[in-house]
């Protein structure tokens, strides 16, 4: 039973590692797909109606902000040991109601932008498979985002990002755990950062898996990119973003090929990210 879960559900579980406003919800499972296996998912992620931003001194934006993302994600087994990953984020961000007693004067306009985020491709290679599974992974994010200076809406990092990670996991009869560590290396004078995280999942009842997770990102503060005032106010994809986040997620399989996911998380001990819970939901379909 657990063998089947490892081969078919672990890459699913990682998919709704919730997309924060800083949009680092990359698949970090230790398990690769078998040759010819395909997994696809469409998910909706939202950070609704926030106006408070974590920083060295917490501040309030002059308008309410909602950050929505539709993600199209896929994994394909090029071989039993090598998996291709593709992620297409479509961002829909709105600046809305004026906030009284804001830290800032009214400097950002009311508008809505729907556009691409940072397109991503990656490969994951199985390094070891025994009681534990070990995999190396490299993700590349393209600089495909956009920026509207009047509203401060930025749909992604204005940089290319290269993310090598080492992923480890182990499965048991009715639960599993996995962890990862790596770095985000960014161009265009952005700081790079260290990242580490882990999760524990349990098969609660038939076809239902519940997961608790933690993710940590720490900036190396080695970049000196500058931003206009509107971008600094919204806090969207600016430099030196950091956080420790915990969350819960779940998966329900209607059939062996089709199911739903849902999750929530909240960041604390953070810098330059919204002080608001993030929510996600998705549908997945796979071919073995």
Image (spheres, rainbow, N blue to C red):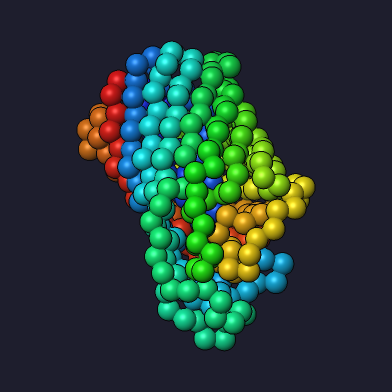
Q: Indicate the quadrant containing the C terminus: top left, top right, bottom left or bottom right.
A: top left
Considering every residue shown, the one lying at the far bottom of the view is 101
Residue at coordinates 59% horizontally, 24% vertically from top-left? 136
- Relative to the observer, which residue lies in front, 203 or 151? 151
Q: How many dots with numbers?
A: 0
Q: Residue at x 52, y 73 (%)?
A: 108
Image quarter of the N terminus: top left
Q: Determine the residue positioned at 38% across, 32% down.
A: 74
Picture coordinates of residue 238 (x, y %)? 62, 56
In the image: residue 190, left or right of residue 277 = right
Which residue is depicted at the point 33% across and 33% down? 40
For the residue pair 288 and 151, the one nearer the viewer reads as 151
Identify the image quadrant of residue 62: bottom right
Q: Position of residue 121 (x, y in %)?
A: 48, 31
Q: In this view, which residue lies farthest toward the left? A: 255
Question: Horizontal placement of 43 versus 189: left or right?
Answer: left
**For this rendering, which residue is in front, 140 or 205?**
140
């Amino acid at each position: 039973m657990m063998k089947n879960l490892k081969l078919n559900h672990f890459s699913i579980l990682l998919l709704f590692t919730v997309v924060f406003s800083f949009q680092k919800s990359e698949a970090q499972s230790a398990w690769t797909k078998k040759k010819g296996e395909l997994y696809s998912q469409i998910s909706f992620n939202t950070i609704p109606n926030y106006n408070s931003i974590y920083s060295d001194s917490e501040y309030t934006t002059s308008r309410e902000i909602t950050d929505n993302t539709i993600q199209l994600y896929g994994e394909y087994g090029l071989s039993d040991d090598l998996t291709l990953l593709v992620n297409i984020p479509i961002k829909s961000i709105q600046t809305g109601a004026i906030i009284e007693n804001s830290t800032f004067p009214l400097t950002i306009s009311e508008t809505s932008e729907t556009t691409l985020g940072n397109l991503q491709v990656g490969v994951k290679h199985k390094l070891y498979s025994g009681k534990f599974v070990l995999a190396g992974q490299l993700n590349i994010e393209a600089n495909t985002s956009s920026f509207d200076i009047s509203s401060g809406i930025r749909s992604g990092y204005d940089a290319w990002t290269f993310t090598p990670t080492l992923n480890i996991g182990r499965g048991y009869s009715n639960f599993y755990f996995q962890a990862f560590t790596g770095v985000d290396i960014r161009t265009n004078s952005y700081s790079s950062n260290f990242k580490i995280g882990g999760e524990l999942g349990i098969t609660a009842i038939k076809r239902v898996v519940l997961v608790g997770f933690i993710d940590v990102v720490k900036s190396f503060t080695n970049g000196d990119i500058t931003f206009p005032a509107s971008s600094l106010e919204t806090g969207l994809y600016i430099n030196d973003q950091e956080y420790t986040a915990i969350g819960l997620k779940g998966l329900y399989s209607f059939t062996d090929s089709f199911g739903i996911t849902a999750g929530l998380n909240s960041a604390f001990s953070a810098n330059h990210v919204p002080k608001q819970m993030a929510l996600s939901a998705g549908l997945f379909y796979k071919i073995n």
